[in-house]
Image (cartoon, rainbow, N blue to C red):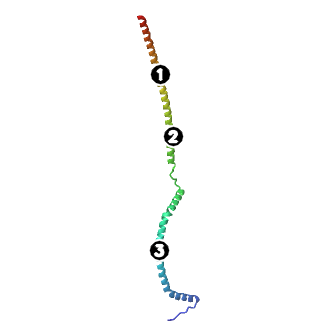
Amino acid sequence: MAIEVPATWVGRMKDQAVRTGRRMQPMADQAKVAAAHRIEDARYWAAPRIESAAHGFEEQFAPKVSLMLTNAARRIDPTPSRSRRWPMLVLLSGLAVGTIGYMFYRRNAQQWTEHMKDSASDASRWVNEKADRASESTDRMAANVSDKADEASRRMS
């Protein structure tokens, strides 16, 4: 076998790199196997920790991020959102109707009370008038009886 000697400096560097590469190949293979084992061990170690971190992130940060994104979407949405004014409008309308109803009740109660006072005074006036008429009638009858008794007593004497 004949050895070729390169004539240029680049050729000599190339030849030396090839020889060094052949000598290093078994060590590189061993390093490759060792690195593969180390990477596999690292994966076995890291997988449960990454999964635990993912669950923690999902439970703690995801709801906050989701809420933040939802709020941002609502703010920039060009379609008008449903108004929340109608429940307040219904509440205020109900309050106004209730107030008006209460006012009518109070007014009607006052009118009824005044009407009952008037009716009671009318009734007492009517009773007084009847009593006066009965008293006058009794007085007249008593006077008639007294007159007749006097006349009868004069005739007898």
Earlier-in-chain disc, 1 versus 3: 3
- Residue position marked by numbered label 3 in the rendering: 45
Earlier-in-chain disc, 3 versus 2: 3
Question: SS class of the residue under badge 2?
Answer: helix
The structure residue drawn at horizontal position 47% and vertical position 27%, both measured from the top left corner, is 120
The structure residue drawn at horizontal position 42% and vertical position 11%, both measured from the top left corner, is 145
The structure residue drawn at horizontal position 44% and vertical position 16%, both measured from the top left corner, is 138
Whether 7 is drawn above or below 82: the answer is below
- The mark total stands at 3
Amino acid type, mark 1: Asn
In the depicted view, which residue is nearer to us: 135 or 28? 135
C-alpha span from label 3 to label 2: 73 Å
Q: Residue 128 carries which label?
A: 1
- Residue position marked by numbered label 2 in the rendering: 99
In the depicted view, which residue is nearer to us: 106 or 18? 106
Count neighbours of disc 2 (C-alpha within 10 A) and say few if under 14, some if 14 to 19, many if 20 or more.
few
Whether 69 is drawn above or below 118: the answer is below
Earlier-in-chain disc, 1 versus 2: 2
